Image (cartoon, grey):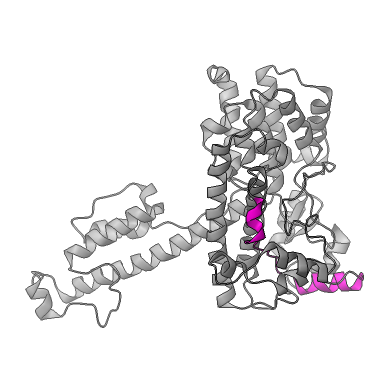
Amino acid sequence: MPHAQDPRVEQLLRELHATLGRRKRPEDVAHLVQDLFAAQGADLDAATRTALAKATETSLRTLWHGYTSMREEFAAPCGAQRQLARAAELFPAVPDLPAEAGDDPDRIEAVIRLAGEEIHRAYGQNDFGMDRLDRAERAEAGLGGVSKRRYNKRFRLLVRMEAKLARLLAEQRRREVVLTGKGALAHRMPYELFAADPGTAAFVAYMTARARMRSRFTFDVQRRPYDEVAAALFERLRAAPGSTGWYAIAHVHPVAEVLGHLDDRSLGRLLVHWNGVLREVAGVLEEAWNRCPLERGTMIVRRGKDSSTWNQAAQAWTTARNHWFALLTELGEDGILDRYCPGKVPRLMAADVAYGHLRRGRGLHPDTFVWSELPLPWEVLRGEAECPRSLVEAVCARHRVDPVATGWTAARPAAQAVAFGATPELVHGVAVRDPLMASALRSAGVFSGRGKRAAAEEWS
């Protein structure tokens, strides 16, 4: 790579790549992009200069540049470092392991199995009443010199470690769902692919930051990721298609123009991956549904329901489904949808938001009625229910929904660029005036629970 010899460019590319796993504000990423182009000595066109200047201009927003009251890291699962350290104390066969081993499920399971061999316990034997060895069995197994108290302590530790491993796997899967829903495959992109072309890296990092903007408490649509800054960065890539990393861009922006630059092998690799994501996310949705069935006809969340898990999985499903549809279309295989067309999955809506829509004469979104009449997506993926394109079209027609324009039976059309807007500080989805005010209000618990609607009207 020609830029690899420039330490400043390399440093900025590393910083941009690090944002793919975080939740940086688009303005902060735009600052890095501006610095990257300056370090390269890139000759920017007027549109790109204007767009970047608008995102980084001196204003109330840049007065707080580099500081925000909101977390910039996605919550990471708590590893099993403490349990591994305790296992090393109690079991001579278990070595001292580095801290990163506590985040690796395979290494944790290997330690549980290795330690279990010392006390003749098989993996999965977790019943304290039935699976422990009594005195005679311990003596027969060569553990006669181990006291009952010490044996029980070891047995209990391994039982707790198995439970911890199960929680860690579930939390890691949930984090993967969140990252996929918010930024598609950005967080999985290796540095070498990301940094092969600085212009591509700038676009991918900025688009990912825009896609990960937090949802606002509003009765209108959420802001779209593709804005005028992203459009200007993309226009630069159009001007030099030979050097652009189209495969990297397809990880986050699967429009026909981007996919058209890829060969069938690259398209097929992405399709296989997204097919796997659909199945994983469908499993999360099914688990959430089985724990607490929802009101399909309204999708209004009730008190005590786990709306977070469902909404995170629904967003990941939407992202994966959009990529999957776009790739099928580009490969000329969208005929598959004639037999196999899994529907969209709506998010749960808070009761006060639903009430606000009702007061404004909007009612429920038409997609809710379509979703409620189609087979559940996990049943479709397993082949337990049929959902051909003709069925989706018939249900859409019944509720006066355009199945193509709304993405029910076809890939969505390319997004039109929206105007850039500064990222607001949010407290439970409500925009406030500045980061310090947001910190104070969050500490005080303002805007949580009831009264959020009135707060939104006052502060947004």
Q: Is residue 355 magenta?
A: yes
- The image quadrant that residue 379 belongs to is bottom right
Residue 278 seen in the current view: yes
Where residue 264 appears, as percent x and y from the top left, is: 57, 38
Q: Residue at the bottom extreme? A: 129
The residue located at (33%, 57%) in the rendering is 108
Q: Is residue 281 magenta?
A: no
Choose between 260 and 386: the one closer to the eye.
386
Where residue 455 appears, as percent x and y from the top left, is: 83, 65
The residue located at (55%, 43%) in the rendering is 268
Dividing the image into 4 quarters, which one contains the N terminus? top right
In-image side of 324 versus 280 (left or right):
right
Q: Bounds of the magenta span?
A: 334-361
Q: Is residue 260 above or below residue 284?
A: above
In-image side of 76 versus 399 (left or right):
left
Dividing the image into 4 quarters, which one contains the C terminus? bottom right
Where residue 59 appears, as percent x and y from the top left, is: 83, 37
Q: Is residue 150 above or below residue 41?
A: below
Q: Is residue 142 above or below residue 137?
A: above
